[in-house]
Image (tube, grey):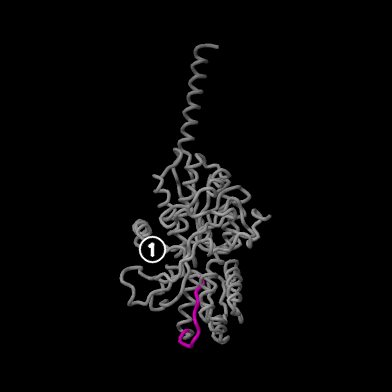
């Protein structure tokens, strides 16, 4: 071999080594926030969830294991086919390591199926169906903050026991709404009440008149709104126009976010009992985090979905750090082993079915004259530890924990 050939070989070898290091240094831990950014859940999730995920990345200095933490986002418009296609593209061609949020349960189940096929982690925050930790449970999915079981247990049970023993449901006609009505019915009947009827409305309904008139005509003591986002706002507004509460019926919003209360105002929502896993004004830690969130979003208040995205992404990154790898199987195992600790969770357990056992709160919306400062909306009625609020694992039919 001539000197020229040897020199050329050494040069190429060095170039390959340098190039290899460059590729490694450029690798990222990529988090995808996939949700509704233009429809009925844009206010309680949307770009606010993206901001929350980025706050979690900031907590780790923007990088882990020598790799930059990158947050990307897309709007699936609450369409399962778009959600599925986007998740597949992210995992197959864009090197996304995990997906957070999910928004509508129907879209969430589509994301979950792709994540299961690709063995990638899915942190569920927006979707509420309790089936995510039931028949559809997965070793790589984690359900943060609320679900339909906890919402039903705290809200429907409390109202029924207080005398609201006949119900008529106005229900969103997709996975979340049906799961919420199903779970609420269980607690209503267990408390001695009964459901006298229901009407299902399409997602994104701008006119709830026919459904509310049916509820009014039923003479049920309680009109249960098994819906959420802009739809629940529309229902509450139009219920006011029809004089449902003035006529002697009680309005029960089974999933009302603080963003809904803010949009509708205290005059329209005062007295409503709502269930939540997060309220920005709970303590010094939540207030300090809310200050960061306000700064990141131009002064908006965080819903429990957005706080749940923060919590889920923070827990994922803590597990990556502890595991020393972003291998999804290893990280998922570490996420199960580790307690969830952040600005509103202290040593919270993750069950084998993926349920994160957040403390849940039954809140009452304040009257306008009770609110003393911006977003001073709630007072705590009941605090329920996660072990009591969520469905027992033995009742969930999760295939991972059978036997």
Give the image location of residue 386, x and y in percent: 51, 61
Main SS of residues in magenta: loop
The answer to whether residue 128 is visible is: yes
Q: Is residue 321 left or right of residue 370?
A: right
Q: Is residue 397 left or right of residue 263?
A: right
Residue at point 45% right, 84% down? 241
The answer to whether residue 77 is visible is: no
| The one of 310 and 319 positioned closer to us in this rendering | 319
**Magenta residues (range):** 245-254
Which quarter of the figure has residue 78? bottom right
Q: Quadrant of the C terminus?
A: bottom right
Residue located farthest toward the top when viewing the structure as drawn: 2
Does 105 lie within the magenta span?
no
Does 249 lie within the magenta span?
yes
Give the image location of residue 287, x and y in percent: 35, 60
| The one of 146 and 389 positioned closer to us in this rendering | 389
Q: Quadrant of the N terminus?
A: top right
> Does 36 appear above or below 158?
above
Q: Which residue is mark 1?
A: 282
Element type at mark 1 = loop
Residue at point 63% right, 61% down? 396
> Does 281 appear above or below 165?
above
> Does 66 appear above or below 90?
above
């Amino acid at each position: 071999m001539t000197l020229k050939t040897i020199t050329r070989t050494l040069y190429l070898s060095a170039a390959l080594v340098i190039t290899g290091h460059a590729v490694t240094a450029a690798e990222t831990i990529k988090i995808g926030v996939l949700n509704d950014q233009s429809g009925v859940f844009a206010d309680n999730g949307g770009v606010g969830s993206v901001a929350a995920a980025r706050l979690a990345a900031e907590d780790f200095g923007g990088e882990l294991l020598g790799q930059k933490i990158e947050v990307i986002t897309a709007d699936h418009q609450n369409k399962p086919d778009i959600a599925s296609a986007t998740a597949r593209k992210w995992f197959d061609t864009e090197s996304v390591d995990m997906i957070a949020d999910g928004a509508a349960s129907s879209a969430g189940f589509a994301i979950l199926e792709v994540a299961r096929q690709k063995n990638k982690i899915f942190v569920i925050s927006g979707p509420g169906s309790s089936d995510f930790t039931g028949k559809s449970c997965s070793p790589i999915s984690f359900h943060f903050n609320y679900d339909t079981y906890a919402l039903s247990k705290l809200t429907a049970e409390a109202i029924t026991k207080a005398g609201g023993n006949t119900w008529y449901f106005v229900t969103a006609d997709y996975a979340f709404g049906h799961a919420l009505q199903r779970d609420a019915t269980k607690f209503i009947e267990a408390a001695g009440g009964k459901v006298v009827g229901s009407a299902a409305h399409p997602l994104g309904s701008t006119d709830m008149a026919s459904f509310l008139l049916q509820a009014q005509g039923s003479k049920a003591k309680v009109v249960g709104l098994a819906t959420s986002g802009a739809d629940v706002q529309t229902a509450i507004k139009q219920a006011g126009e029809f004089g449902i509460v003035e006529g002697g019926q009680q309005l029960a919003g089974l999933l009302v976010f603080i963003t809904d209360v803010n949009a509708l105002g205290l005059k329209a929502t005062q007295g409503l009992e709502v269930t939540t896993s997060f309220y920005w004004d709970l303590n010094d830690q939540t207030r300090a985090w809310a200050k960061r969130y306000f700064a990141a979003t131009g002064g908006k208040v965080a819903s429990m979905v957005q706080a749940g995205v923060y919590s889920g992404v923070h827990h994922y990154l803590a597990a990556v750090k502890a595991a020393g790898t972003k291998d999804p199987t290893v990280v998922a195992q570490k996420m199960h082993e580790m307690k969830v600790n952040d600005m509103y969770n202290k040593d919270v357990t993750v069950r084998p079915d993926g349920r994160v056992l957040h403390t849940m709160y039954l809140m009452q919306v304040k009257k306008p004259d009770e609110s003393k400062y911006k977003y001073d909306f709630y007072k705590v009625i009941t605090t329920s530890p996660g072990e009591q609020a969520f469905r027992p694992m033995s009742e969930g039919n999760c295939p991972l924990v059978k036997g």
